Amino acid sequence: MQPDSRTANPVPDELLHPPYWLVSSLDWHSDSAMAEAAVAIAPTMIPRYTLSEDARQVLGCADLYARKHGQQVIFFSDLTRMFADAGTSWTQLGVDWQNALQELRSGQFAALSLTISERAYLFLCDSESSSPVAATSVEHAEDKRELVRRAVARQLGRDWPPYMQRAIHAGRI
């Protein structure tokens, strides 16, 4: 029996379900409690040879962080926090993180904009491990940060596969 044209070239599972996403914040432009204020990319889908050294460094750090922590969603602020805890920074490492993020957001890569709450935005942006971000304790803030991470993971798990299917069908991937 011959496969029909719809199943002859199945979509690789990694396109629909990448091992992890890197999520970074966008500027908050809203007077409401929700805004399209974050963007998610799948670093494993991005050909590194097409990137600047700064963008390669950001993705390399994200790869290492994902392997070490086994998380499905990595906030860019997690990487910044890791450096701060180690007593260094993107700048001290010679990485222009702002240009790197701009390149990753504006490149011809799959990137999904996320609508998030203002409170989730605060946790997404917080790169200080000692900052409770409007919580009563650092431990409570970390619990809240993980709740935000799980909510973003659920949102991406639900929205990424159809987004990628549409991109593939449109010939963008």
Image: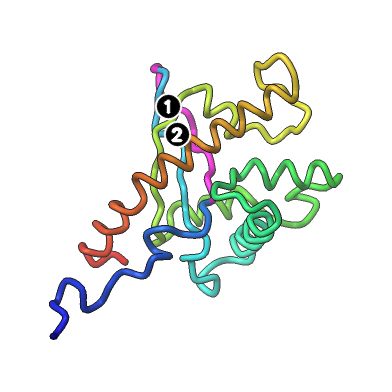
Identity, as a three-letter code, of the amino acid under mark 1: His
Q: Nearer the viewer, residue 92 or 85?
A: 85
Q: Which mark is residue 100?
A: none
Picture coordinates of residue 104, whole percent (x, y): 50, 56
Residue appearing at x 39%, y 43% in the figure: 113
- Left or right: 79 with respect to 124? right
Secondary structure mostly taken by the magenta-highlighted segment of the chain: loop
**Mark 1, secondary structure of its residue:** loop
Q: Closer to the N terminus: mark 2 or mark 1?
A: 1
Magenta run includes residue 150: no
Dividing the image into 4 quarters, which one contains the C terminus? bottom left
Q: Residues within 10 Å of mark 2 (few under 14, many from 20)?
A: many
Residues at circles 2 and 1 in contact by the CB criterion of under 8 Å: yes
Q: Say above or below: 69 vs 31.
A: below
Picture coordinates of residue 160, whole percent (x, y): 36, 50
Residue appearing at x 67%, y 17% in the figure: 135
Identity, as a three-letter code, of the amino acid under mark 2: Ala
Residue appearing at x 43%, y 54% in the figure: 106
Q: Which mark is residue 37?
A: 2
Q: Residues within 10 Å of mark 1 (few under 14, many from 20)?
A: few
Residue at the limit of the structure toward the bottom, as seen here: 1
**Span shown in magenta:** 22-32
Residue at mark 2 to residue at mark 1: CA–CA distance:
8 Å
Tell us which disc is closer to us: 2 or 1: 2
- Left or right: 26 with respect to 4? right
Magenta run includes residue 30: yes
Name the residue beneath numbered marker 1: 29
Picture coordinates of residue 54, whole percent (x, y): 63, 60
